[in-house]
Image: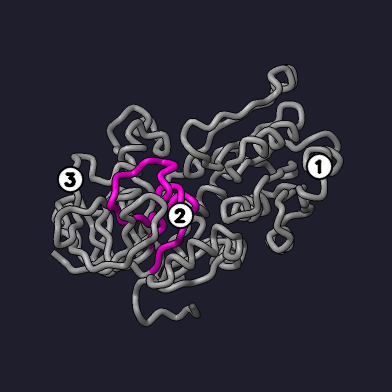
Amino acid sequence: MREIKAATIRQKGGPFQVEKLSLDEPRSDEVRVQVVAAGMCHTDMVARDQLYEVPLPIVLGHEGSGVVEQIGRGVKKVAVGDHVVLTYMWCGHCKPCLRGDLTYCQNFYALNFGGTREDGSTATRDANGPIHDHFFGQSSFGTFALVHERNVIKVPKNAPLELLGPLGCGIQTGAGAVMNALKVSPGSSFAVFGGGAVGLSAVMAARVAGAAIIITADVVPSRLALARELGATHTINSRETDPVQAVREITGGGADFTLESSGRPAVLRQAIDALAIRGTCGIVGAPALGTEANFDVNGVMTTGKRIIGIIEGDSKPDLFIPALVELFTQGRFPFDKLVKFYTLEQINQAAEDSEKGVTIKPIILLKEGHQYEV
């Protein structure tokens, strides 16, 4: 076993506690990764606060990036020394997986929120016994992570590894919602409701996709200013202006595509109401389990609107994450403008800053000798 340092959650609501733990050797189909950095996502707080129930104690973190340290004897996808991004987990054998719908894996919740491998085992322990892990197949709020070969994605060594972790979840969710799920088309109109990391990633993706009108609605002026910098043609402060009316005025009747990223039912209603005839609204915001929302049934039916749920941007990570890295390298997808770095000991501050909107995308640095300023 390898000794690691990791942030655990031992009670509902936290705090994160930095502790020394032990991590198993990789099995035949597993990869042990020295984590360089891990993004912090809203879903980490959702799990911490038990809005989605996860077993405790647990090591969270699901936007890891790092270097392959050791591989199981059956691993062919990566080699020791490869630079990798860690992403969500899927089973590979259920009907949705077999038809290529990886993000809708029949076992998605168990594999990503269950706190164990698929067989119910864990790889992490403290002096008293097992600690739940494998959060999103990785639990990357630690100096090392043990992952399946399936959800480790090789990336070029010339890309800045400390930055890349958020591509594994939040960034690919927003970008993939635009590119893969909604299929925003050149010349179309797109409006995102919520200007956090997911929403702003959607803005950048809509620009890459060639949307002519790109609208961001949020209540934080600094986020709206950044949205314009990243490609939004229009911004709406929803505290000052009715966003539905504003979108309709800007687009001349409604947006072709909208995306709800706030997780608030009232905002979802706005995103649906702001659609044009035959428009499509995507849902990526994650409220507590059991949350219900309402919409005008006739308003949807008689205009042919579509409402679709989107998980992880409908991404096939082995293809999509390297594509996002290439777009970043070309300067066409500058997601580095969303981030701020923290040490592992500052993880609770990172969570607080994220929840207050002070930081859009915190990244926790886990390997000493990093080149980024904390």
Residue 221 relative to residue 208: left or right:
right
Measured in 3D between alpha carbons, the distance from the residue under mark 1 to the one under mark 3, in whole angstroms, is 50 Å
The numbered mark, 2 or 3, whose residue comes first in the sequence reads 3
Cα separation, mark 1 vs mark 2, equals: 36 Å
- Check disc 1 and give the amino acid type: Asp
- Specify which label sits upstream in the sequence, 1 or 3: 3
**x and y percent of residue 14 in the render?**
39, 56
Q: Is residue 212 above or below residue 102?
A: below
For residue 121, the mark is 3
* Quarter occupied by residue 73: bottom left
Q: Is residue 194 left or right of residue 340?
A: right
Q: Are marks 2 and 3 in contact (CB under 8 Å)?
A: no
Q: Does the magenta portion include 160? A: no
The amino acid sitting under disc 3 is Ser
Near-viewer residue (204 or 308): 308
The residue at the point 77 percent across, 53 percent down is 235
Magenta span = 37-64
Question: Which mark is on residue 242?
Answer: 1
Q: Which mark is residue 103?
A: none
Which circle, 2 or 3, is nearer the viewer? 3
- Label placed on residue 321: 2
Across and down, in percent, residue 271 comes to 69, 37
Q: Residues within 10 Å of mark 3 (few under 14, many from 20)?
A: few
Screen quadrant of the N terminus? bottom left
Element assignment for label 1: loop
Judge the density around disc 2: few (<14), some (14-19), many (≥20) Cα neighbours within 10 Å: many
Query: Residue flagged by tag 2: what amino acid is it?
Result: Ile
